[in-house]
Image (cartoon, helix red, strand yellow):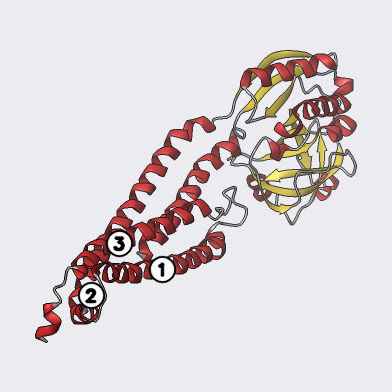
Amino acid sequence: MFIGVLALVGVSAASSIAGDMLVAYEEQTGGRAVTMTAQVDVPQEDLGPGGRALVDVLNTRLGNAGQAVVSGQSTVFLRTPAEFENNQAASVLDIEWDAGDLTSVRRLAVTDGRFPLADEPFPPTIAVNEVAARQFGFPEHTSFFLGTSPDARGALFTVAAVIADGGTDPKGYGNLSAYASLLGTSDLGPLTVRVTSPTIAEQASAGLVADAAADLGLALSSPAVRTDTTWRVAAQIETLSVIFTLFAVVMLLVAAIGLLNVGLSAVGERSRELVIRRAIGANRRDVFLLVMGSSFAMATVVAVVATGAAVVLVYAVAPSLVPAGSVVGAPPFPWMACVVGCVAAALTAIAGAAVPAMKAARLPVALALRE
């Protein structure tokens, strides 16, 4: 029974981890659940304040229902101060320049430093993914000149964070206001608007983006459409949940069969004690309740011990198994599964003890007289 209850809690936590692993990669690379994406034309001279204003309007309209990010992409040429002094060739890095909290629309893990970056152009900072950190020698090199051409000195940026974005190519992330203030000599083209709002219908989210842009006098070059891919793993998560639940049910059935066998054996060993109780005045109901009560008391103890073990496993063991910087979070304790497991333990005890209790209640009193 202990294994059965622990299995029910364990498989619930394992199902949560497995489901989170499937969703995590999709949210890391493609966006959190129900992310709508549109393209908006913002004048080059208004990149920083325009992008920030659009994010503010969208977040105001969304309230607590979601978050928005406005971003543009550019390729920059970077050199360390030493490489610049020695006139060495610049390296190339693709950077996404954002207004708003990028972690609100993508699940990103911070492996070093602090992210998201401060929403201010100064001091100029960027974040890089793990691939770029390895390629450009972080943390040995933390400052780089970023320019829009191979020969330009550009502006000095500091690497403030390293993040796990699921990408296989080097990539950086910066503040749109910093780009507009320090590097805004080249056009980013249409900016990308992303809105994550899982509680709002897709059509309503698309209309919200269009209305916000119109309020600021901006034109959408493409309407908002859903671009996240979390829906792809919904069926897999449901299948995993069914498999884990069936496993727990089988474990509880095995526990019930074990209780039945143990109960029948115990009744055989206690037959003399039980018939003596009958002989001195106990009726069949008293004997039945005695056997059932002892089994139920054992189930209660087992449920408490199993719950304690499950708490230790979920809060102490499981977090240590999640790698540092992983986008997969430690599972929350499945209290509902724990309650179900305790109830199942009680029902299992009743089912497993019912036959032995009825057998004990029917033991003939003549056995005591003969002995």
Q: Quadrant of the N terminus?
A: bottom left
State left or right for residue 128 relative to residue 317. right
Q: What is the C-alpha distance between the residues marked 2 and 1?
A: 18 Å
The x and y percentages for residue 351 are 29, 58
Badge 1 amino acid: Val
Q: Secondary structure at mark 2?
A: helix
Q: Residue at x 88, y 22 (%)?
A: 46
Q: Which residue is mark 2?
A: 266
Sort mark 1 into few (<14), some (14-19) or many (20+) by Cα contacts within 10 Å: many
Q: Residue at x 50, y 50 (%)?
A: 17
Q: Which residue is mark 1?
A: 302
Q: Quadrant of the C terminus?
A: bottom left
Q: What is the C-alpha distance between the residues marked 1 and 3?
A: 12 Å
Q: Are marks 1 and 3 in contact (CB under 8 Å)?
A: no
State left or right for residue 186 relative to residue 9. right
Badge 2 amino acid: Ala
On the question of residue 218 being in view, the answer is no
Q: What is the C-alpha distance between the residues marked 3 and 2?
A: 16 Å
| N-term mark: 1 or 3 | 3
Q: Which residue is mark 3?
A: 255
Q: Residue at x 85, y 47 (%)?
A: 85
The x and y percentages for residue 368 are 15, 82
State left or right for residue 58 relative to residue 21. right
How many badges with numbers are in the image? 3
Sort mark 2 into few (<14), some (14-19) or many (20+) by Cα contacts within 10 Å: some
Q: Residue at x 36, y 45 (%)?
A: 243
| N-term mark: 2 or 1 | 2
Q: As rendered, which of 11 and 29 lies closer to the eye?
A: 11
